[in-house]
Amino acid sequence: MKRLIILLLFLTPFLAYTQPSEDLPSDFLNQEFHKGRRQALRDKLPSNSVAVFFANPTRNRSNDVDFVYHQDPNFYYLTGYKEPDAVLLIFKDKQTAKNGAQYDEIIFVQPRNANAEMWTGRRLGDEGVKTKLGLNQAFNNTEFKKYNIDFTKFDAILFHDFNNDVRDNPKDSADLYSLIEQFKQKVNYPSKESTLNVARESKKNNLNTKELPVLMGMLRGVKTKEELELVRKAVSISGMAQREVMKAIKPGMSEREIQGIHEYIFKKYEAEDVGYPSIVGAGHNGCILHYIENYKPTVANTELILMDLGAEYHGYTADVTRTIPISGKFSVEQRQIYDLVLKAQEEAMKACKPGITTQELSTITRNVINRGLVELGIIKTENEKHLYYPHGCCHHIGLDVHDPIPQGKLQENMIITVEPGIYIPENANCDKRWWGIAVRIEDDCLITKDGFELLSSSAPRKAEEIEALMKEPSALDDFELPEIK
């Protein structure tokens, strides 16, 4: 009996921090999806090669507080593993272990630790990775140092090169910093003193830091059925937030309050996070493309507010922008700029289909905007250089808000944004009546067999539709908090 009590005392912390399945959503990507993605990569790997992936580092926010951990998208795509301090190897060909077993993939993960899990959350450990994620060759990361595979036998070792920005935890000999250093030793990575970078060194060895980003971009660019479901959910949540904010917004609100309404709605629909820092810029703040301070305490009745926000749902992010008048009605000048941006967007959407490039779509929007700016007297000629439209109109979305997809022609089941904009800052070289007007309209488009599907159609785009929705009552109309003095 005494031995049984001691055993139960030892196991209790691990039992206490085992996540009940009913506590989790049921629509995460399953292990078969990730297994299929690993095989898809293996099929693309060059002969006699191995691809190596590292988990994202933990980032410090300040003192002893870290940012909420976010897994490297490629690592998550291939494994479903959401924890730090891990390394994954995918082999083109079968390898033979010392015991004679054959394998073509192996992962090293952080071990179970009752004390750590009590403070920072549950861990899968090697056995959890085997049962939950289906990676049968799973070991604790402390075993990676002893992993004695001969890397010189491969024609190519594919990996993303290092930025040397990972902190070392001296108390952990298997943290990410240590795993990277151990890998460098195993593959004879060029020393710090070397004057040649890895790309140049690769001509003399089997290290390849160029090909893996391209292969992963090709894989992640074309979404599977399972991925499409998650992106649709993220976009639907983001569109709903835009709709509800249009109804709830009132003059005198702060940029931060408007951001908070958006993000509350994201959370209400079980989105885990935002896909990127939320952009809520009123008036001239909308002219800052990545304005994330959102500090303006009072939005004036005469201003437009540009709201670029995307919910992240199970790792996949939306990217939806709407620009609306805080008063509920566009002024004449605001409406003219808004309609010009909308016209540019709709012209580009007409061309959205397999075979076109995002560069060609950007050219379509730029031509429409330049003609319109000439007609409004804001620029003199269509070829005049200006900064009123300083960005392209499209990028891919998925696990990243800017999915790293190689440039090329669009294919069926790719998802892109179409987001033209016009930004006229204070003191611009045009009539003063245009100053402070910033408009961006951004939608998420799924490329179909012969066209596109507008995923973000639930959020109104036409000026008259926006004005009509802003007249509707909001669920937040009666929500008032006591004043804090």
Image (spheres, rainbow, N blue to C red):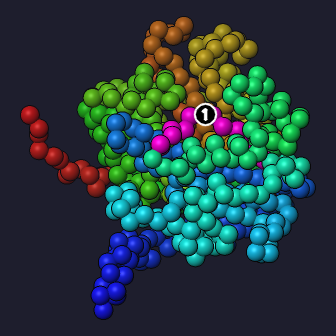
Above or below, 293 against 142 in this view is above
Residue 317 seen in the figure:
no
Q: Quadrant of the N terminus?
A: bottom left
From the image, tell me which residue sits under label 1: 164
Q: In the shown orientation, is residue 48 left or right of residue 413?
A: right
Relative depth, front residue between 85 and 74:
85
Residue 185 seen in the figure:
yes
Residue 450 image position (x, y, % from top left): 79, 56
Q: Main secondary structure of the magenta part?
A: loop
Magenta residues (range): 158-170
Above or below, 370 against 261 in this view is above
Relative depth, front residue between 410 and 40:
40
Extreme-bottom residue of the structure: 1
Q: Which quarter of the figure has residue 9? A: bottom left
Q: Which secondary structure lies at badge 1?
A: loop
Residue 328 image position (x, y, % from top left): 36, 37
Above or below, 149 against 165 in this view is below
**Does residue 162 belong to the magenta stretch?**
yes
Q: Residue at x 51, y 40 (%)?
A: 168
Above or below, 193 against 399 in this view is above
Q: In the shown orientation, is residue 188 left or right of residue 309?
A: right
Q: Amino acid at mark 1?
A: Asn
